[in-house]
Amino acid sequence: MITLSTHVLDTANGKPAAGLKITLHRLAPNPTAIGVFETNADGRVTEPLLNPEQAIYGSYEITFHAGDYLRNQGHDLPDYPFLDVIPIRFGISSASHYHVPLLLSPFGFSTYRGS
């Protein structure tokens, strides 16, 4: 069974990133918009990112809407912030759990395949 989760930590403020908008798309095969989500108080998405019908092998893009979140946290960002929308492209090629976390600040981010 394929499952997908994410977790966003606001490293500038040292806390989970609550209220951050996330979108998910499958790029191949059969490109499709899968969903729009928002992180909870723990920086996680409560509902499954993929339902069983959507969870197939392929290429995906999870997009973190960081600029809106950072502005809402009181960061004084310019009209064209260094980080605004952060797309992460990844592949699902086995029936297992995929976790795509994001560590975020106004001027940097990192991700990895978590557990």
Image: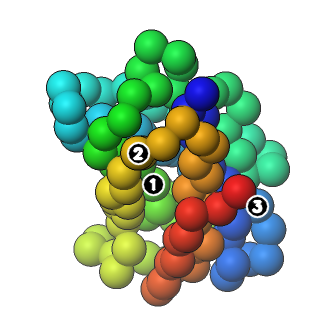
Q: Residues within 10 Å of mark 1 (few under 14, many from 20)?
A: many
Which of marks 2 and 3 precedes in the sequence?
Answer: 3
**Labels 3 & 1 near each other (Cβ < 8 A):** no
Q: Secondary structure at mark 1?
A: strand
Can the viewer see residue 65? no
Q: Quadrant of the N terminus?
A: top right
Q: Answer with mark 2 or mark 1, whichever residue precedes in sequence.
A: 1
Quadrant location of the C terminus? bottom right
Give the image's coloring scheme: rainbow
Structural distance between the alpha carbons of marks 3 and 1 = 14 Å
Determine whether 114 is above or below 62 in the image.
below
For label 2, the residue is 93
Q: Which mark is residue 30?
A: none
Q: Amino acid at mark 2?
A: Ser
* Left or right of 74 on screen, residue 80: left
Per the image, the residue denoted by label 1 is: 64
| Mark 3 residue element | strand
